[in-house]
Image: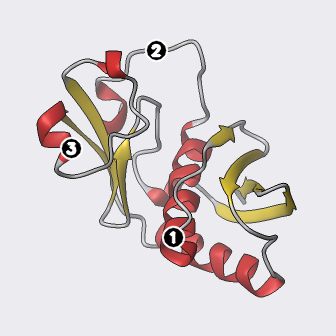
């Protein structure tokens, strides 16, 4: 068991560790490229997943290619995925706690993917990005201010 899984407490919604880690990479890439914030809704499954973002249009083919390249660059670097358990005050100095429920308690779990991404999370993750496979965007669509990105991981 890796450190990111060591203190994990099962919750009703289990995620595939690799896909969940890929979601974090996609979110950070969207933040870096478009300053749009992390996904406000996500559905993570082993075969394919989706993330929804508040956005003003669909992505271009060039942008899709750039997102895939950036995510796959981090995957190829095989960086460690780690956790920190911090007090709420300590965590607030490192990450936004805006989406954290008030009843989350005083000990907050932070997941870091190397220096690329850091956020609060209670889910399970891979140990290293090299375990994820190749990230592909299957499709995107935009409707009423919501950009949906569907993606998968090829393990071959």
**Residue in the image at 85% along x and 61% along y:** 142
Q: Which mark is residue 137?
A: none
Whole-percent x and y of residue 118? 34, 54
Residue 156, placed above or below residue 105: below
Q: Are discs 2 and 3 less than 8 Å apart at CB?
A: no
Q: Earlier in the sequence, mark 2 or mark 1?
A: 2
Q: Secondary structure at mark 3?
A: helix
Mark pair 2, 1: CA separation: 32 Å
**Residue 37 visible to an observer of this rendering:** yes
Instruction: Judge from the rendering whether residue 135 lies leftward or rightward of residue 123; answer left or right.
Output: right
Identify the residue under disc 1. 35
- Left or right, 90 with respect to 144, comes to left
Q: Which residue is mark 3?
A: 92
**Looking at the rendering, in which quadrant would you find the N terminus?**
top left
Q: Which residue is mark 2?
A: 10
Camera-nearest residue between 4 and 2: 4
């Amino acid at each position: 068991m890796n450190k990111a899984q060591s203190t994990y407490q099962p919750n009703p919604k289990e995620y595939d560790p690799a896909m969940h880690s890929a979601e974090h990479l996609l979110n950070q890439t969207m933040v870096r490229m478009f300053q749009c914030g992390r996904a406000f809704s996500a559905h993570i499954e082993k075969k394919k997943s989706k993330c929804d973002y508040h956005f003003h249009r669909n992505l271009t083919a060039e942008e899709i290619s750039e997102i895939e390249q950036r995510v796959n660059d981090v995957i190829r670097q095989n960086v460690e995925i780690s956790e920190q358990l911090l007090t709420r005050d300590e965590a607030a100095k490192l990450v936004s706690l805006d989406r954290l429920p008030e009843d989350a308690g005083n000990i907050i779990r932070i997941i870091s993917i190397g220096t690329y991404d850091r956020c609060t999370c209670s889910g399970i993750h891979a140990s290293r990005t090299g375990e994820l496979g190749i990230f592909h965007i299957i499709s995107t669509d935009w409707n009423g201010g919501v950009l949906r990105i569907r993606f998968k991981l090829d393990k071959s």
